[in-house]
Image (cartoon, rainbow, N blue to C red):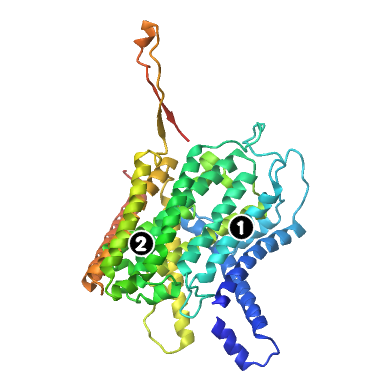
Amino acid sequence: MQGFIDSLLATTTTGLSRELAYLGGMIGFGALVVFGFILPMAGITSWLERRVWAKIQSRVGPNRVGPGGFLQWLADGLKNLLKEDVIPEAADPTLFRLAPYIVVAGFVAAFVAIPFAGSLIIADLNIGILYISAVTSLVVVGILMAGWSSNNRWSMLGGIRSASQIISYEIPAGLSVFPVVLLSGTLSMQGIIENQGWAPVDWHMFHSPFTLAAFLMSYIALLAEGNRTPFDLPEAESELVAGFATEYSGMRSLLFFLAEWGNLYVIGAIMATLFMGGWQVPAFTDNVVLLTVAQFGMFFAKTYFWVFVAMWIRATLPRVRVDQLMSLCWKYMVPIAMVNMFGTALVMVVIPEGSRLMSYALCGLMLFGLVRFGRRVNYHLKRSRRYDTVGAIMPV
Amino acid sequence: MQFEYANVLVFLGLGLFLCAFMMGLGSLVRPHNPERKKLTTYECGEEVQGDSWINFNIRFYLVALIFLIFDIEVAFIYPVVAVFKQWVADGNGLFALTEIFIFISILVAGLVYVWTKGDLQWIMKVVVPVKPADDPKQSQSPKVGGTIYVAD
């Protein structure tokens, strides 16, 4: 982006000083990303999520506002805008008001280092992935603040549970990043992507069995960090009403959910960048604009695939218990993540160039698994259709 | 470099502005009529009994403590893994691998210690020693030396 502003300054003769132009550019681009991308994206994700659940659970879902209910998110936003802002008498008003600010600021700041395309990144920080894991954990502070300041037992328990869950899963999430950093030798997001290729065999995910395991660990840990089902204990309706957000109403509660839906995109972007080659596309053209659009499309598709999987999981799986949550993290994921990290280092020392054969084999294995899964789904769909037409109850 | 980190500040500011903007926009159109009943704490319709700023389960504190130790260790590993590729290229791979192995072993030793101490166990079993009663009839009862399960 710096280069872009420099070239703009060179071609036009405005009386602006360099610093002022930089500041203007930063705020302009930032506002464009925040209001033009993050806000609609989080809203549309909320609509899409409800539609996807509905499809999976044989319901219709929101379909009234706009074509296919597409504008539902705007209607929801407008509705929440018109709702009264209630702050309980017993609450700590300052912290109560401050909490959504911290949650949203933490999640918006993560977008600085997300590489949308080869030249489309706000700032390619040299500590990219470390930075993202650092700012996304600001959310813990906000949630703990919300839970404590509400002076409500549900909120209190929800907030503390959420904090303990997020910090626990930060360990496997951090350890699962290491195999990728070992392979690419850099923490910068663009550097990590450039170390991979567009073909699946060149992805970090298929480098060795350890990275494939790290990939799965990473997704599970990120889901738990984003408070998503099956790890949505902080918002467990059946036991904690709405968890840390119980006392929040109207716009304030919407801000929490905005961060949650937006976080889904961040999770997807981290997965796509670290393990799936990010925006890498085959060099099919010399046209920079066309290439950038293709790269953006590729990155968006990969990211949304993981967003979709998160929705799918939410519609399918039941919630885990709090003791299962903790034992899964500390007794299974942390040791496995450590083995993954050491194993990747070992593979790098034994075969410094990496083994193409292993990559192809792992790729083939994944393909086999996917085909098998597809056939299974197809079989069940066919079977359920058959029973539907007869009108018989499907045997279990 | 400075330009890139300035962006981080700008984005943090924009995040705060986003909230302030939406709350400010709402304050122009939303109603505001607070009322005693409305402002009470939600307790599923029950009368609120006292504060909720109470002593909570000590186990959350333990989790935070374990996290703190592990997170510092993770932060220490970051620079090592970032230069590991360069070390392998220089032919010092085995040396670096041994170092990483020793470091992870210390980490694992910590985990094993916490594990064997039972601090990873969410549902704890607390054994309460019961003195044998003087009454022979009571001492024959099977309830001597009971266990208490502490749940969340």
Secondary element type, mark 1: helix
Q: Which amino acid lies under the numbered mark 1 shown in the image of this protein?
A: Ile
Whether pointer 2 and pointer 1 mark residues with C-beta atoms closer than 8 Å, the reply is: no
Q: Nearer the viewer, residue A52 or B104?
A: B104
**Apparent side of residue B24 relative to residue A371 in the rendered image (left or right):** right
The quarter of the displayed image where residue A342 is located: bottom left
Counting from the top left corner in percent of width and height, residue A391 is at 36, 47
Q: Which amino acid lies under the numbered mark 2 shown in the image of this protein?
A: Phe
Above or below residue A94? Residue A265 is below
Q: Residues within 10 Å of mark 2 (few under 14, many from 20)?
A: many
* Chain to which the residue tagged by mark 1 belongs: A
Counting from the top left corner in percent of width and height, residue B110 is at 36, 48
Please tell me which of labels 2 and 1 falls first in the chain: 1
Q: Residue furthest top?
A: B136
Q: Nearer the viewer, residue B56 or A213?
A: B56
Q: Residues within 10 Å of mark 1 (few under 14, many from 20)?
A: many
Return the residue at label 1.
A102
Counting from the top left corner in percent of width and height, residue A285 is at 40, 88
Secondary element type, mark 2: helix
**Apparent side of residue A66 relative to residue A87 in the rendered image (left or right):** left
